[in-house]
Amino acid sequence: MQYNTDNQGRRGFLVRATQALSALIGGALGIPAFVYLFTPAKSRSTGGWVDAGDISQLKLNAPEELPFRRVRMDGWKIITEKSTAWVVRLSEKEVVAYTPQCTHLGCAYHWEESKGQFLCPCHTSNFSIDGKVLNGPAPRPLDRYLVKVEGDRLLIGPEQSKAKGA
Amino acid sequence: MRAILAWLEERTGAPSAIQHFLDEEIPASAGWHQVFGSVAMFLFLTQVFTGIMLALNYAPTPGEAYNSLRYIMTELTGGALIRGLHHWGASMMVIIVVLHMVQVFLWGAYKKPREATWMMGVILLLVTLAFALTGYLLPWDNRAYWGTVVTTQISASAPGAGPYVLRLMGAENGVGVVTFARFYAVHVLVLPPLTMLLILLHVYLVRRHGVAPAPGDEVKPKQKFYPRQVFKDTAAISLAFIILFSLAVVAKAPLGRLADPTDTTFIPRPEWYFLFLFQLLKYCEGPLEILASVVLPTLGVGLLFLVPFLDRAPVIRVTKRTTAFAIVILAAITWSGLTAAAVRSTPPEAFAADREGPMEWRDLTPEELAGVSYFKSESCGTCHTLGLRQEGKPGPNLGAGGAARDAAWMIAHFKQPASMVPGSQMPSVSLSDSQLNALAAFLLKLTPQNAMKMQDIPQYVLDGAALYQKNRCNLCHQVNGVGMKTGPPLNGLAHRRDATWVKGHFLDPQKFSKDSMMPAYPFTPQQNEAITKYLMSLP
Ligand code: FES
């Protein structure tokens, strides 16, 4: 069978041109798709301050669990979630707020008045009042929220570790 | 590499199958005019890809659909581009499929033994249109909603089958959640696999019969599909892709206001390729209507199907097929004539209707008007512009239109600006919740077209509406159809009472009508003047 074929040089050109064009189209579709899937949404609310209540009655070294409501973007929805923080007045000037999850696997811990420690019942991690790990499997001290005190009110911000980038 | 190929060859036979596919013999006359099929297939695959990308962030229920799509377009990097590719890709797909058919028709490539290939192609055309029709509803903006209302009504007018089609579309009681679910299911679950199957069969048939030769091809040496024709196909695909990509970048895919079934001012328009049918429908009134809505389209599709049987003459050179050319030209003229007529008869507002918003303050509700007054009293105008003029103020131009935020977002933003827009310098707005609602309601009505006008609303209207809002008159009265009906609606008050009566009535209602339940409102004279004048000027 006789075929009408191109000479070697022209054939090579056609093959390379086809490959180049295909790669170009692949890139023009693939790169936007990658960016679309892996870039976080533009208006993420990480910088909000919410009022967690009056702390004028909060005693020195007596942790209390304060509830607050936070408005958050969940995709295209604005949701308000209930959350809590363990708030401690460590000194006259210093008030800290810990996130309510244990740093090991996220169980809820509580303040054990008699021992003067935070206890996590799941795998018995203990934390001191300033959040340090005393024993147990927890890998790091309790996570903290950013806090601001305005008059008697405690304002809670994003988590300290997550706020850095924001 | 060679070892892997050998392994694959032995286990699956794929390499030699591909080789066989690429080495396909094609006639000497094959060339640039035969690229359309490949382009159509490419566009279909691109639609599948961008469609999947959209679906990853899209919530397929009416209200959510709109919000999530707006989120895709405004919050996600590359989201607007991907939606643009999908939106314009649909139009290009229709164009290319039609061009493909025109080419086959002109060359007479549907002749024996290729009749089935042609008919499969007609089905693929219908499937493409079904994609367009069902996809049109999915953004759930006014355009989508009203366009689909028209579609469902046209199908309902089909003699006999009408009610069944309507029931199948879940649109017996109007376009709603059921219709939406069905359109979505058809668009993403039914049509894509169906199309793939049909394309597979179509390509199989093309391969089985070979690419249609032109007269004289028998004596010339054949060519191979790869690489010459593959290159031509790829080049054409690239050209189509460049056009598509540029469209997606330059022309933003439209997303109007959230679908509003009570909005009677919206003039529904179908997508451009259906405009000719829409126009045809206008010419046929009354009993003739089914002619345009059902009879002619059915006839048209039927004729298309039968083309290979109507023309059984032997294949001749394309340049000699004058009748075919005449038919195509006639069809093109008819189509463009009808489309042009439809475009010309479109009132210019209809193009912008979904972005225009109310032009007169009389169309606004008291709540929205109160919002305007809060906008002024809170001096929002120091940082924001409303109109098209940009004067270098620190805040964004609120009248720029386009994909706006929703009320919940705005209210959260008013309360704590930085929580919604990190780094925002805007101070929080100290208004009550109902006042913030009013402000948001007004901002939602802002569009580039009406923004300037909103700055010129007379002060007494704003003061009057703010009082109306503050005293919650809407709990008993209606203005522009908003509010309760315990008391009389207030539109047209001027026809019933005079200003002195209204003013006196506010201060002591029972003095004027004994059994009135309305409490007294001890307005100051200025307040009374403003609210009375406002209410008296309601149409
Ligand atoms: S989760 Fe708290 S110790 Fe394991």
Image (tube, coloured by chain):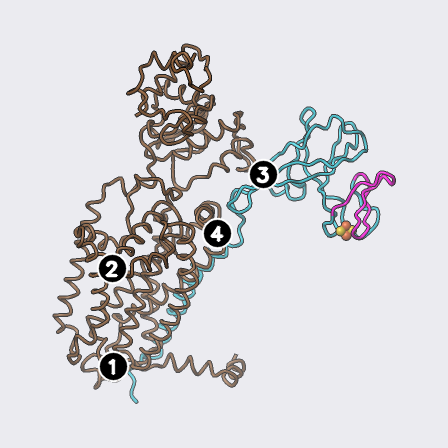
Chain colours: A cyan, B brown
Residue B10 in the image, given as x and y percentages of width and height: 51, 86
Q: How far is disc 1 from disc 4 in space, using C-alphas?
A: 47 Å
Label 1 SS: loop
Amino acid marked by disc 4? Ala
**CB under 8 Å between callouts 3 and 1?**
no
Q: How far is disc 3 from disc 1 in space, using C-alphas?
A: 67 Å
Which of disc 4 and disc 2 is earlier in sequence?
4
> Is B289 placed above or below A69 here?
below
Q: Badge 3 is on which residue?
A: A71
Labels 2 and 4 within one chain: yes
Amino acid marked by disc 2? Pro
Chain name for mark 1: B
Residue B296 in the image, given as x and y percentages of width and height: 20, 61
Task: In the rendered structure, find residue B402 and report the number of the disc placed on it.
Answer: none
Observer-side mark, 3 or 2, equals 2
Chain name for mark 2: B
Report crowding for label 4: few under 14, some 14 to 19, many 20 or more residues within 10 A (C-alpha): some
Amino acid marked by disc 1? Pro
Q: Quadrant of residue B160?
A: bottom left
Q: How far is disc 3 from disc 4 in space, using C-alphas?
A: 21 Å
Q: How far is disc 3 from disc 2 in space, using C-alphas?
A: 54 Å
Labels 1 and 4 within one chain: yes
Q: How far is disc 2 from disc 1 in space, using C-alphas?
A: 36 Å
Residue B383 in the image, given as x and y percentages of width and height: 45, 27
Q: Badge 2 is on which residue?
A: B159
**Which residue occupies the foreground of this view, B116 or B449?**
B116
For image coordinates 31% across by 57% down, the residue present is: B163
Q: Which residues are magenta?
A: A108-130
Task: In the rendered structure, find residue B113 and report the number of the disc placed on it.
Answer: 1
Labels 3 and 1 within one chain: no
Label 4 SS: loop
Q: Badge 4 is on which residue?
A: B59
